[in-house]
Amino acid sequence: MRGKREYVLNSRKVAAAAVFTAVGLAISPLSFEWLGTRAFPGQHLVNVLSGTLLGPLWAVAVSIAVGTIRLAMGTGTVFAYPGGIPGAIAVSLAFFLTSKFTRPSMRYLASFAEPLGTVLVGGTLSLLVVAPLLGPGVGPSAALLRSLENFGPYTALLILWGGWFTSSIIGSILGYFLLVAAHKYGVLGRMYTSARAGSRR
């Protein structure tokens, strides 16, 4: 009986992860270029949804899936990985704290942890670690390296953070209001309970 229940829970999580991945891909053209990277608010929206409803491991998996397929489709760059994964983890970890609140407006404030992961962690790693490792021969990293050379690390970081924060906060706001509305009108229902129960096993 327990094995069957776990199978059902995992199946629901797989289905939800597939839906979130599909949503991310469907809106992937809605991105803008920033220092050679493709800032994509939809990735941060998906991070918020998967991070709160599925937990950190599944949220990371969804982020990797969306980034990989976007890269293959030409709508993203290699910086989709450092620009997406930390935000998904940040939302998941924050939700472990905010999930204790009963009011939806407080419960889903974890959505706004996404920029902390994306901007501070992902942006910094992208500029100071990933771009130098890739070198100027890889198109997207060339623009970051030029910015680093022309402005120095601190100013270059602020410039990169600015664009990525704009993208991230848009996705976070959309995700927050979507989750609050879904909670209020009972849309999440059993999907929410099952996904979180499964992630604690």
Image (cartoon, rainbow, N blue to C red):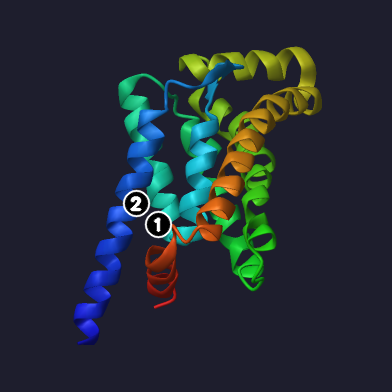
Classify the position of the N terminus by image quarter.
bottom left
x, y percentage for residue 102?
A: 64, 71
Does residue 139 appear to the left or right of 103 in the view shown? left
Q: Residue at x 44, y 53 (%)?
A: 59
Residue type of the residue flagged with mark 1 = Trp
Q: Residue at x 40, y 57 (%)?
A: 58
SS at mark 2?
helix
Residue 35, placed above or below residue 116: above
Residue type of the residue flagged with mark 2 = Ala
Q: Nearer the viewer, mark 2 or mark 1?
A: 2
Residue that label 1 marks = 58
Q: Are marks 2 and 1 in contact (CB under 8 Å)?
A: yes
Q: Which mark is residue 120?
A: none
Does residue 65 appear to the left or right of 11 in the view shown? right
Residue 99 can be seen in this image = yes
Residue that label 2 marks = 17
